[in-house]
């Protein structure tokens, strides 16, 4: 599912922090690891699983199209859509789930062996940290069982916020819904103006006015929430003595979860 515009603004803020933090982390921390998820995903075992899932989806798409054609009402179509989405999700858990679980166990096992407090996605690391990709890859492809680590990750000076939890807050959802409606209404109005424009210069002006209108409304409706979220995150980071805060999706192991602190500060 595509993330909302507000979510994208949050991600931009977090990414900006992440880009500058690793150099400092390299000097201050020796318990930070990173993993190249793309390299892990390219392992033959994952490639075979994905190919198997793609083949199942291809067959399911044909069945879905036939079922939708037979549906007589919007309610039936919605029911068919939900049914087939569930079938795909179940198959994904069946085929990819075991390998995903094994990969998670491998990351935890390697991190515990190397005494790491957090493992990040390689994409946000510019300098420093320990690359554990090969160790995790070797453990995943080995024939031995991977036990669940008995110890929990040690405290980390890197924190994270779950963006999906922020998106679910009523005030955030309402702001995104209102902005989406404004964008849609404004687009329709400007399409009419664009079609009525007689010269290229007039059309360019209409397009410019549309962009300005969207930007102004975005600043008016979304920026206050972005600013308050950034402030709440900074306060939570200070409270927990953290050096860096990233989005939950960038953390593969460990880290300090600030989600509850931030959502509580933002309120409903």
Image (cartoon, helix red, strand yellow):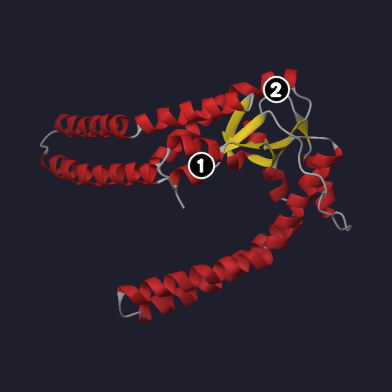
Is 225 displayed left or right of 14 in the figure? left
Numbered label attached to residue 163: 1
Give the camera-side residue of 247 and 40: 247
Say which residue appears at 82% left-offset and 49% top-offset: 149
Give the camera-side residue of 171 and 70: 171
Q: Mark yes or no: residue 18 visible.
A: no
Q: Which residue is mark 2?
A: 25
**Marks 2/1: CA–CA distance:** 23 Å
- Badge 2 crowding class, 10 Å Cα cut-off, few under 14, some 14 to 19, many 20 or more, is many
Q: Position of residue 1 (x, y in %)?
A: 46, 53
> Dividing the picture into quarters, in which one does residue 146 lie?
bottom right
User: Looking at the image, is 130 positioned above or below residue 64?
Assistant: above
Is 250 displayed left or right of 84 in the figure? right
Is 245 displayed left or right of 223 in the figure? right
Is 142 displayed left or right of 5 in the figure? right
Q: How many marks?
A: 2
> Dividing the picture into quarters, in which one does residue 132 lie?
top right
Q: Position of residue 250 (x, y in %)?
A: 62, 39
């Amino acid at each position: 599912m595509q993330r909302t515009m507000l979510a994208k603004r949050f991600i931009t803020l977090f990414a900006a922090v992440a880009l500058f933090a690793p150099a400092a982390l390299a000097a201050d921390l020796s318990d930070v690891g990173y993993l190249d998820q793309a390299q892990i995903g390219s392992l033959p075992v994952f490639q075979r699983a994905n190919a198997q899932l793609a083949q199942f989806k291809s067959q399911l798409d044909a069945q879905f199209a036939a079922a939708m054609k037979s549906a007589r009402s919007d309610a039936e179509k919605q029911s068919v859509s939900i049914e087939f989405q569930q079938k795909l999700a179940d198959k994904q858990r069946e085929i990819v789930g075991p390998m995903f679980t094994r990969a998670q166990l491998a990351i935890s096992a390697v991190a515990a062996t190397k005494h790491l407090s957090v493992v990040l996605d390689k994409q946000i690391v510019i300098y420093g940290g320990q690359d554990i990709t090969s160790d995790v890859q070797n453990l995943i492809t080995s024939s031995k069982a991977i036990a669940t680590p008995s110890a929990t990750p040690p405290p980390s000076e890197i924190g994270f916020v779950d963006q999906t939890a922020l998106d679910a807050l009523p005030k955030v959802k309402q702001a995104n819904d209102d902005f989406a409606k404004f964008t849609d209404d404004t687009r329709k109005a400007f399409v009419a103006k664009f079609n009525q424009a007689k010269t290229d210069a007039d059309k360019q002006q209409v397009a410019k006015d549309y962009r300005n209108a969207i930007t102004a409304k975005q600043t008016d409706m979304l920026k206050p929430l972005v600013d308050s979220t950034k402030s709440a995150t900074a306060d939570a980071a200070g409270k927990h003595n953290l050096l860096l805060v990233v989005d939950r999706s960038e953390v593969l192991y460990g880290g300090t979860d600030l989600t509850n602190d931030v959502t509580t500060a933002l309120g409903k």
